[in-house]
Image (cartoon, rainbow, N blue to C red):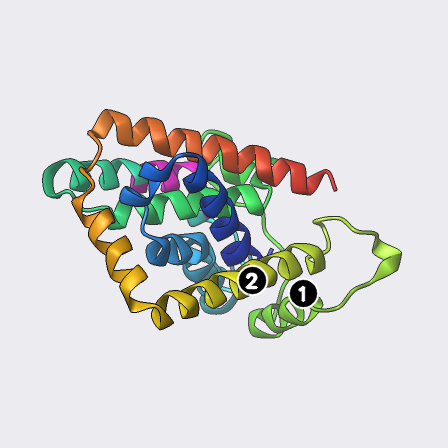
Amino acid sequence: MLLFGHIGITLGIFFVFSYIAPQLKTIIDKRYLVIGALLPDLIDKPLGLIVFASTISNGRMISHTLLFSITLFLIGLYFYNKRNDIVIITLASGSFFHLMEDQMWNTPKTLFWPLLGWSFPKDDISNGIAFLLMLFKESFTLNLSQGFSLERTFIPEIIGMAVVVIFTLNWLKNKLSKTVSKDEKIKIENTEKPTIETTVFYIIGFLVFGLLSVRAIVAL
């Protein structure tokens, strides 16, 4: 899954779950959720496919592991508890979603690193930049002979693009009706922040809901 898939599907799941559990909006910042949903690729792909392409040649390394996301989540809990800061905990939530959307359970050696060994699977990719450009192009190329599965990135990219468009239109609507936006902002600011125990409960629920949602998309 690439850019629009990661952003749109993560935001879409956040929108649905926050409708069910509105307090999630006081824990998760949409802006940093988007960054978190891209964070593993922002770290691993430049390093593995460009900087160390001749030796590592893999765009899914340390940032695509559970260890990375769990560590980031624990750091986020610390800052939330000490400073009431939701930035890092939101980044961690987004990175968890990235792992789900990449179906990292199909690559357990990477997902559970270093429990199954210290090395990462190596791909035979000599030109990382050309490979990334090819992946981006394939995101918008429908190949019916391959079927409609997440192994082809077309469908999640289109779903993600649709969600991004909906969120953009909603943002523009709120910008045009400033009174509504201010009321909503005041309402969120006046909402008491949940305790750390409640925060963990909400985020685990959010991630479980996300996992079930991603698996449902995989089954399409």
Apparent side of residue 80 relative to residue 98 in the rendered image (left or right): left
Q: Is residue 70 magenta?
A: yes
**Residue 40 appears in the picture as rendered:** yes
> What's the amino acid at mark 2?
Phe
Nearer to us of marks 1 and 2 is: 2
For the point 58% across and 33% down, which residue is it? Answer: 212
Residue 83, located in which quarter of the rendered image? Answer: top left
Within-10-Å neighbours for mark 2: few <14, some 14–19, many 20+: many
Q: Is residue 122 magenta?
A: no
For the point 65% across and 66% down, which residue is it? Answer: 135
Apparent side of residue 162 relative to residue 42 in the rendered image (left or right): right
Q: Secondary structure at mark 1?
A: loop
**Looking at the image, is 86 positioned above or below residue 35?**
above
Viewer-proximal residue among 121 and 219 = 219
> Image quadrant for the C terminus?
top right
> Image quadrant for the N terminus?
bottom right
**Residue 124 appears in the picture as rendered:** no
Magenta extent: 64-72
In percent of width and height, residue 215 lies at 63, 36
For the point 24% across and 25% down, which residue is it? Answer: 197
> What's the amino acid at mark 1?
Ser
In percent of width and height, residue 124 lies at 65, 59
Q: Secondary structure at mark 2?
A: helix
Report the residue that reaches farthest toward the right: 145
Which residue is under mark 2?
A: 4
Apparent side of residue 31 relative to residue 107 in the rendered image (left or right): left
Q: Closer to the N terminus: mark 1 or mark 2?
A: 2
The answer to the question of whether label 1 and label 2 lie on touching residues, with beta carbons closer than 8 A, is: yes
Viewer-proximal residue among 183 and 105 = 183
Which residue is under mark 1?
A: 139
In percent of width and height, residue 86 lies at 24, 46
